[in-house]
Image (cartoon, grey):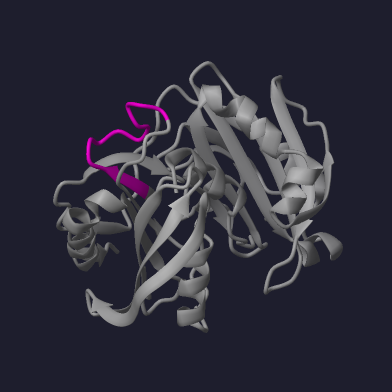
Amino acid sequence: MRPAQAIASVAFLIGLLCPVMTGTALARLQQAPASRIVIDLPDGYKAARLFTGFVNETAGVSLVILEMPSVAYEQLASGLTPAALAAKGISKATAGKLDRPEPYLFMRGEQASAQGPVAKFLVAFKNKHVTALITANVRKASLDDGQVDVADVEKILASAAIARAASPAREVYRLDYLGPFQPASRILGTTRAYTLDGKFEPVKRGSRRALLLVSPSLDLRTVNDPDTQAEALFLGLPGMKDFRILDRQRITIAAMPAIEIVGTASDADGGNVSLYQVLVLPPQGGYYRLVGQVPSDDAAKLMPELKKIAHSFHTVE
């Protein structure tokens, strides 16, 4: 999983939260934690704990924010088409217009979930420094019964803007040991990348290198079959093929049950990589996922380090 592929994966494999608003609520400007994005929001919204964005748990809407460098806008635009969204499980996608300054791209669609269909509203925009993608996830039932109005959702997305500076991050986990790895970048605010040089992008574009990603699930739903879920996540790592699971076991991390998978795969260029994944299952629901990849030539040295890092994981209340 290369960094660029990790960003694309986060952008379009965003989970389905459910919260929204009423047309009579008073709006107020809010800035998401660990983000430069400000949005005019009605009462009832609060900052999400497990991702960068906002939720309205009463109405059933989530606003998931992703920030990237400005140069990513054109690449992101190629993914905001009906065909590209359909490949990601978003059906009935159509382009729309918002009352906001150009340039921007706006798409509506629908996606299935275990809780029923979810309406998706995606807007991408940029300035000279930042590209932003905001995804509004709305329970279809809330739209059908009139609890949520499409015009209100689109008004919220039209109000989104980029501030000069990011707000402070909210930490939801900590690693007491990092070994040779260094913090490199944040994705969705609570997902963190770690590399050997502390830089998200490799010095030489396309080079194969060690990478660790740590991220929480986007909500606290109970994982009913964690073994199956862990394997599906492992085998679904983007940019990889020819997966082989070498070891899988139940372990305990910070007094929480976890599933550890060790394996190998080939990347897009046919190079061999070693993979390490741990799915930690906190008692309140949801999961935390640690995914590491290292070039096979470095596996003997770095795979034990990834295991030490995983075993130093703790949640932060």
Taking the view exactly as shown, the residue that stands out farthest to the top is: 128
Examine the rendering and report whether any part of residue 162 can be seen. Answer: no
45 in relation to 95, above or below:
below
Whether residue 199 is in magenta: the answer is yes
Q: In this view, does 68 lie above or below 313?
A: above
The image position of residue 72, as x and y in percent, is 55, 28
**Residue at x 60%, y 49% (from the top left corner):** 63
- The residue depicted at 60 percent of the width and 61 percent of the height is 17
Labels in figure, total: 0
Residue 176 position, x and y percent, is 15, 58
Q: Is the magenta stretch mostly helix, strand or loop?
A: loop
Q: Nearer the viewer, residue 127 or 209?
A: 209
Residue at position x 81%, y 48% in the image: 150
Q: Where is residue 114 in the image (x, y as percent from the top left)?
A: 67, 74
Figure quadrant of residue 79? top right
- Horizontally, residue 280 falls left or right of residue 154, namely left
Q: Which of 313 and 227 is in front in this view?
A: 227
Residue 276, image quadrant: bottom left
* Quadrant (top left/top right/bottom left/bottom right) for the C terminus: bottom left
Q: Is residue 17 visible?
A: yes
Q: Relative to residue 34, is residue 179 depicted above or below?
A: below
**Residue 88 is one of the magenta-drawn residues:** no
Q: Which residue is drawn at 16% across and 55% down?
A: 301
Residue span colored magenta: 192-205
Residue 214 on image: x %, y %: 35, 55
